[in-house]
Amino acid sequence: MSEFLLQQPSKGVDEHLIEFSEALRTVAKALRRVAEGKASAQAEAAEWKRKYELERARNLQRENIVAELPSGDDNINCCEHERIGNVHNESVLQTRSNEQSEKCCGKHGICSHEVLRDGDRDPGSKILHDKYMRKASFRLCWGCNGSGQHKHDIVSFERGNITTAERSSKQISLKWESPPQTVLILTKPNSISVRHLCAEMVRWLKDQKKINVFVEPRVRTELLTESSNFNFVQSWEDEKEILLLHTKVDLVVTLGGDGTVLWAASMFKGPVPPLVPFSLGSLGFMTPFQSEHYHECLDSILRGPISITLRHRLQCHVIRDAAKDELETDEPILVLNEVTIDRGISSYLTFLECYCDSSFVTSVQGDGLILSTTSGSTAYSLAAGGSMVHPQVPGILFTPICPHSLSFRPLILPEYVTLRVQVPFNSRGHAWASFDGKDRKELSAGDALVISMAPWPVPTACQVDSTNDFLRSIHEGLHWNLRKTQSFDGPRETL
Ligand SMILES: NC(=O)c1ccc[n+]([C@@H]2O[C@H](COP(=O)([O-])OP(=O)(O)OC[C@H]3O[C@@H](n4cnc5c(N)ncnc54)[C@H](O)[C@@H]3O)[C@@H](O)[C@H]2O)c1
Ligand SMILES: Nc1ncnc2c1ncn2[C@@H]1O[C@H](COP(=O)(O)OP(=O)(O)OP(=O)(O)O)[C@@H](O)[C@H]1O
């Protein structure tokens, strides 16, 4: 009897436990569905915002072309619109501007004003407009095995067959249409050799090339301490002026290592002028130019044409749960290498839920996750086991950091997706996001990061061409696949 009394309730408890765990599973499923719905809605919102911004930038650009087009000149090249300021009947001009963009930009490459105008944050500003007039214009062309054809279509239809013979990501070449006049020099701080080289280069550019030179305020002070003759060198005073730099500068020269290239890219929140990175660091993966030969290099770059690597950037938005899913800042954070979400000082596993557009990708449990550009594929992502990818390949690398799972292989996703990484409510610790290794931001439970490809790539000048430079970097910088060749001194095998 006493045994029976003891058994009966335990059976009841088991059943209750089973029922309870099923109920919990149902709740968990419902929560997952809600989270997926939320992820999809936020990804969609971010995508619409991106489309809206692109559309807005395009409209602004169109308005500028319309405002600048003179009447009665049907043969005008759209690059020449830069220099013209007459305002005309909108409907007529709109049609004409479309025709013109077909004549010039649409068929033969991208014109600089198209790239640079998109970043116009203050289109009504007369000062800004005047600054455009001083910019050297250039054209970007896709080379097709030297045949001179310039097709943009990645997929075309010929007699009902789909062909991908012409690719848009061929070697890109930049041709100046008017001579560059202004160079911005950015330097790694705290280096005596960089400081000397900078002073020498500034003098050479001014005296031999009649080029206007911009430097950071810190560097201007350093130059003026050396000699008051440097007072022709220009700089800026506040953040607002940095936002307008891309409208004044034709070329950016960096003196330092990869960190200086990242620094240069981070200064441009919109369009970036072509970058010429000189190597004065130890690794120099993105710095193909040798500083000893800077006269010859800059001579040839100022003359053009230049082979260009268009390095894609990622744009990241932080979404705070506490702010009811509002974006933390309107301006995205742009990264050239990667955004990393890790456990920071927390000793708990990072727990992250990842969504790609509206699909659930996976949960990350480990030290963190790296979302990298292809340029960043040779940096942190490589150290975490990701593939090395040619920088001209448009994709997003999804690389876990020390995942606590035997089957978590890195992924490479197409460039058009929007990713969302969320710290779930049942995460034991917080996560930390860092952008190109800087600006750490704490992510609490419910916070998310939305990441997509930015419309503003970083055009870096190549020493030879994109592929040759990339292969040389992985050979010389990383000693990729270095192995002694097997010796052979035996008799030859006879068949
Ligand atoms: N375990 C790691 O490998 C690790 C850890 C943290 C950060 N990083 C990288 O450092 C970058 C920041 O660079 P920094 O110079 O400001 O910091 P840093 O001075 O700490 O240098 C990091 C190293 O990474 C190299 N590097 C940077 N970008 C590269 C690229 N695209 N390809 C190949 N190597 C590259 C640099 O040359 C340098 O040797 C981050 O974006 C991240 O990719 C790597
Ligand atoms: N103009 C700048 N102003 C402030 N900080 C900068 C500037 N340029 C570079 N830095 C920072 O200085 C640090 C070192 O720069 P960089 O990586 O170019 O030199 P390095 O460490 O000698 O090169 P390498 O990484 O190849 O050894 C980086 O963290 C970078 O962000």
Image: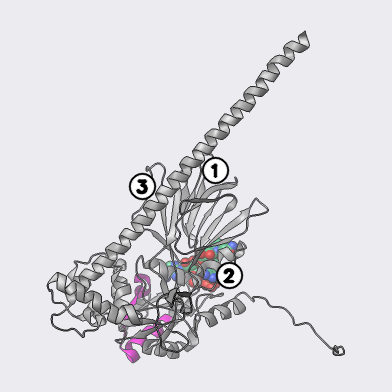
Is residue 88 found left or right of 494 in the rendered image? Answer: left
Q: Residue at x 62, y 53 (%)?
A: 403
Q: Quadrant of the N terminus?
A: top right
Q: CA distance from mark 2 to mark 1?
A: 31 Å
The image quadrant that residue 195 belongs to is bottom left
Residue beneath label 3, please?
Answer: 326
Judging depth in this view, the residue of 190 and 174 nearest the camera is 174
Above or below 290: residue 131 = above
Q: Earlier in the sequence, mark 3 or mark 2?
A: 3
The reply to whether the C-beta atoms of the residues labelled 3 and 2 are less than 8 Å apart is no
The crowding category of the residue bearing disc 2, from other C-alpha atoms within 10 Å (few below 14, some 14 to 19, many at least 20), is some
Label 3: state its secondary structure. Answer: loop
Residue 163, position in %: x, y? 48, 76
Amino acid at circle 3 = Glu
Q: Amino acid at mark 1?
A: Gly
Residue 103, visible in the rendered structure: yes
User: What residue sits right under mark 1 in the picture?
Assistant: 429
User: What is the magenta range?
Assistant: 198-221
Q: Position of residue 171 (x, y in %)?
A: 46, 81
Residue at x 45%, y 49% (from the top left corner): 448
Foreground mark, 1 or 3, reads: 3
Residue wearing tag 2: 388
